[in-house]
Amino acid sequence: MPSDIRLLILPLPAFALLPFGAFLDKLRFSADDEDYSQQRYCSWTLAGLTLDPVPASSGAVVQVEAIAEQLDMAQYDYLVLFGGRNAMATAELAPRYKALLKRAAKAGVKLVAVDNAAFLLAACGLLDGHDVVVHWRHEAEFRATFPHLKVLRDQLYHIQGGRITCAGGTAAIDLAVELLSRACGRARALKGLADMLVDETRDSRHALRSLESGVGHGRA
């Protein structure tokens, strides 16, 4: 049985583990009945430019299962990039990833940038003509580096045609629910939230109360 939604997942070097794990676990809960963890209703492939393990910013290491350039992009609906801790270092990956990302876009795959992956898409010219959501900590840096792009404030994610940007963190759960809702229906998209100890999903325009109150602004 073909999946309702197919995703190609690319963690970039020094990616943040929180949005990566949150996004994947939301897919896992919605992908099957009960808690069987089979990829029935949605499927995904973890890939990299090579088969080398990809280190997260926390020091944890993820083993990919495929080389992205060897995959048939027509088999995927979304290509999801999880950005590295250093925004400019992520942007500097453009020469290595540009051909792959342009091939995916040409094949009609929607490009999803989580956290600092927006810097990579922008550096590749793939966000031109699109509004962008970035993590609040890197908003000024993004505006200075890509002044021709409009940054949306107080949003967790933004979906505009074939480009999707997400601030990162637990907003990856909210984005996953939205993408799953569009492909699988709302009930399946919400499946497993209680298991993840999440009370409810947030609208894309949700403004962080913790940011407004000045709580928890230590260096990441």
Image (cartoon, rainbow, N blue to C red):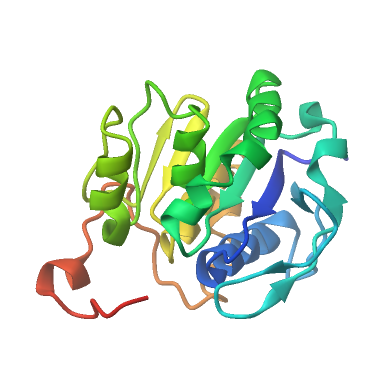
What percent of the width, then of the height, locates residue 11?
64, 57
Q: Residue shown at 62%/37% (left/top)? A: 95
> Quick one: 108 or 197, which is closer to the camera?
108
| Quadrant in the rendering for residue 159 | top left
Depth check: 34 or 57 in front?
57
Query: Does 63 sit above or below residue 129?
Result: below
The answer to whether residue 79 is visible is yes
Q: Could one spot residue 115 in this view of the protein? A: no
**Quadrant into which the N terminus falls:** top right
Q: Quadrant of residue 25?
A: bottom right
**Residue at image location 35% in from the left, 49% down from the top:** 134
- Horizontal arrangement in the rendering, residue 165 relative to residue 216 (left or right): right
Measuring from the top left, give residue 98's x and y in whole percent.
Answer: 63, 33
- Tally of marks: 0
| Image quarter hosting the C terminus | bottom left
Q: Residue furthest left?
A: 213
Is 15 rendered above or below residue 178? below
Of residue 199 and residue 46, the one placed in the foreground of this image is 46
Relative horizontal placement of residue 47, taking residue 146 as reference (left or right): right
Task: Identify the residue shown where x is 75% and y is 58%.
Answer: 32
* Residue at 85% in and 57% down: 51
Location of residue 16 in the rendering, given as x and y in whole percent from the top left corner: 53, 67
- Location of residue 57 in the rendering, given as x and y in whole percent from the top left corner: 55, 73
The correct choice, above or below, for 179 with respect to 176 in the image is above
Vertical order, 58 against 138 (above or below): below
Quadrant of residue 5 within the rendered picture: top right
